[in-house]
Image (cartoon, rainbow, N blue to C red):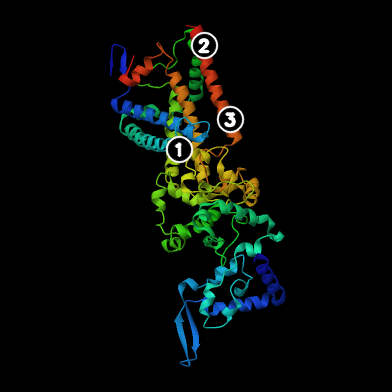
């Protein structure tokens, strides 16, 4: 199945080229890029304006910034969508998943899609929802951008990542696409967390809710809520868990080497307990010891000279 | 005000401030160390509790500082904190010499306590530095960290919160060093406990 889709995409790109791709996209976006579209109704022989189903509206600006910007819509959707009105049965066509194209592809070896799939298989998402929980539930294929590897802004990475989680966990309609239950009240569930809003803005949900895997850039094994990290000192310490998750990216590390303080944890935020400057540490210990020594010597002299 | 060689040096409001401040600062140092050196293997108290107590003690110290500041403005106690630069170096040297040498030779204290002179020069200028520079700095940076949205986001590519925290922790450390010296020097005198009693009763003996 994967090879089949990959071959189709490769062949398509090879034989049709980018210009026709853009043309195809434009053809679809004429209607799907707007909230109102026009059709020529052959029955009434009139041109009519209609409202587009808001769930089928594509933001062409965001799409042009996404990783799949050069794709034609029909690379993933059926070519039969080229005719209007679309055949109703097309809605039931099986869609290509990420691994159908990306799996086994050496070009994307560094992304370790197979390993991601393996880790995801252990996650609470896979356990609870099975195959219905596809990659696109979090990674919207129309707009997805590679942020963690490219961005130099920690808060930008955090915001982008957390929006993926919140797209379902803060949206009952999307949540109930996969679950019969009610979505958890996030604010209430995190009420134990000191400075909740600061945490929400400066660390990703996955920092506490995934099992850190050293060999993967982003852990995809989302744990059940009972296993989420609740011990503050796992992050708030010199050997912070954040160093193995949020702050492990090369793009941030290389920037931190040039940073004023030589420590990425200090560049955009301050994690209490995690920032240890050796110079300040040893300096303070030295001052402390000198003061104690001075006091001790003074006490000894006071006793001797009494 | 003096009776039989005793001088009433510490009025009630000053002792109340001193007590509140001492309690607050001790809690702040204890919880501060617990936060700065937190680790899964070393915890004097739970991290989130340390944060909560640090915040409460910080507010307590800030409020008690207002009491000290206003008290010094409206009462005569403020006169003990007036800077006189003329001859300062010599006065400081005399006091250091006394602590390091003279007191062991049973020399007279160069600046004995009187109604007009509550502090010796070393005390006076260290108190001025702590109470009018370090404590305000630690309070202002502490309030900023309590409401981080008040802080400038970035200064030359470095987080404003980080710089504020660095200032807060560094000044906090200096205050804790002052506390050690302050508590120790208070034991210097005719009897080691005389000054501790004074700050509770208000009377210098």
Using the numbered discs, state the Cα–Cα distance from disc 3 to disc 2 in whole angstroms.
Answer: 26 Å
Q: Which residue is mark 2?
A: A300
Using the numbered discs, state the Cα–Cα distance from disc 2 to disc 1 in whole angstroms.
Answer: 35 Å
Q: Kindly identify the residue that appears in the image at 42 percent across and 52 percent down.
A: A186
Of tags 2 and 1, which is closer to the observer? 2
Report the chain holding disc 1. B
Q: Is residue A37 above or below residue A208?
A: below
Q: What secondary structure is marked by label 3?
A: helix
Q: Kindly identify the residue that appears in the image at 52 percent across and 38 percent down.
A: A273
Task: Give A64 or B33, whichever is nearer the viewer.
Answer: A64
Residue B178 at x, y percent in the picture: 47, 26
Task: Give A97 or A150, whichever is nearer the viewer.
Answer: A97
Q: Is residue A96 above or below residue A295?
A: below
Q: Which residue is mark 3?
A: A283
Q: Is residue A41 above or below residue B55?
A: below
When asked about the image quadrant of residue A181, the answer is: bottom left
Are dots 3 and 2 in contact, CB under 8 Å?
no
10 Å crowding of disc 1: few (<14), some (14-19), many (20+): some
Chain-order first, disc 3 or disc 2: 3
Q: What secondary structure is marked by label 2?
A: helix
Task: Give B123 or B32, whichever is nearer the viewer.
Answer: B32
Disc marking residue B112: none
Q: Kindly identify the residue that appears in the image at 54 percent across and 39 percent down.
A: A274
Report the chain holding disc 2. A
Q: Which residue is mark 1?
A: B137
Q: What secondary structure is marked by label 1?
A: helix
């Amino acid at each position: 199945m994967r090879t089949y889709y990959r071959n189709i995409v490769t062949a398509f790109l090879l034989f049709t080229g980018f210009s026709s791709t853009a043309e195809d996209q434009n053809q679809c976006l004429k209607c799907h890029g707007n909230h109102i579209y026009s059709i020529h109704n052959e029955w009434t022989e009139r041109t009519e304006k209609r409202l587009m189903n808001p769930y089928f509206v594509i933001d062409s600006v965001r799409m042009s910034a996404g990783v799949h910007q050069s794709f034609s819509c029909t690379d993933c959707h059926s070519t039969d969508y080229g005719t209007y009105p679309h055949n109703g049965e097309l809605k039931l066509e099986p869609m290509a998943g990420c691994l159908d194209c990306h799996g086994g592809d050496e070009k994307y070896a560094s992304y370790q899609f197979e390993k991601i799939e393996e880790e995801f298989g252990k996650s609470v998402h896979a356990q609870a929802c099975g195959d219905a929980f596809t990659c696109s539930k979090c990674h919207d294929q129309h707009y997805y951008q590679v942020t963690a590897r490219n961005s130099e802004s920690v808060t930008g990475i955090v915001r982008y990542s957390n929006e993926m989680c919140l797209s379902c966990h803060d949206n009952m309609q999307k949540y109930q696409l996969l679950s019969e239950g009610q979505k958890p009240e996030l604010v209430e569930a995190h009420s134990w967390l000191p400075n909740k809003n600061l945490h929400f803005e400066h660390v990703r949900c996955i920092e506490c809710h995934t099992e850190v895997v050293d060999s993967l850039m982003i852990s995809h094994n989302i744990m059940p809520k009972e296993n989420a990290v609740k011990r503050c000192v796992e992050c708030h310490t010199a050997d912070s868990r954040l160093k193995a998750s949020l702050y492990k990216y090369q793009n941030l590390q290389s920037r931190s080497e040039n940073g004023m303080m030589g420590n990425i944890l200090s560049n955009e935020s301050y994690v209490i307990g995690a920032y240890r400057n050796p110079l300040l540490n040893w300096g303070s210990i030295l001052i402390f010891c000198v003061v104690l020594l001075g006091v001790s010597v003074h006490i000894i002299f006071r006793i001797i000279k009494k | 005000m003096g009776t039989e060689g005793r001088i009433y040096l510490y009025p009630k409001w000053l002792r109340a401030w001193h007590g509140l401040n001492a309690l607050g600062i001790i809690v702040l140092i204890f919880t501060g160390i617990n936060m700065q050196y937190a680790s899964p293997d070393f915890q004097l108290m739970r991290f989130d509790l340390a944060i909560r107590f640090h915040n409460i003690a910080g507010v307590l110290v800030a409020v008690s500082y207002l009491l000290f500041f206003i008290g010094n403005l409206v009462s005569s106690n403020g006169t003990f904190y007036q800077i006189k630069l003329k001859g300062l170096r010599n006065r400081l040297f005399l006091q250091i010499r006394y602590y390091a040498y003279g007191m062991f030779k049973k020399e007279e204290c160069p600046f004995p306590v009187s109604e007009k002179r509550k502090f010796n020069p070393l005390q006076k200028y260290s108190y001025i530095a702590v109470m009018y520079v370090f404590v305000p700095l630690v309070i202002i940076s502490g309030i900023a960290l309590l409401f981080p949205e008040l802080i400038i986001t970035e200064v030359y590519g470095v987080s404003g919160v980080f710089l504020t925290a660095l200032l807060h922790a560094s000044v906090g450390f200096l205050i804790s060093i002052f506390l050690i010296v302050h508590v120790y020097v208070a034991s210097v005198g005719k009897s080691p406990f005389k000054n501790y009693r004074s700050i509770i009763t208000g009377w210098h003996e």
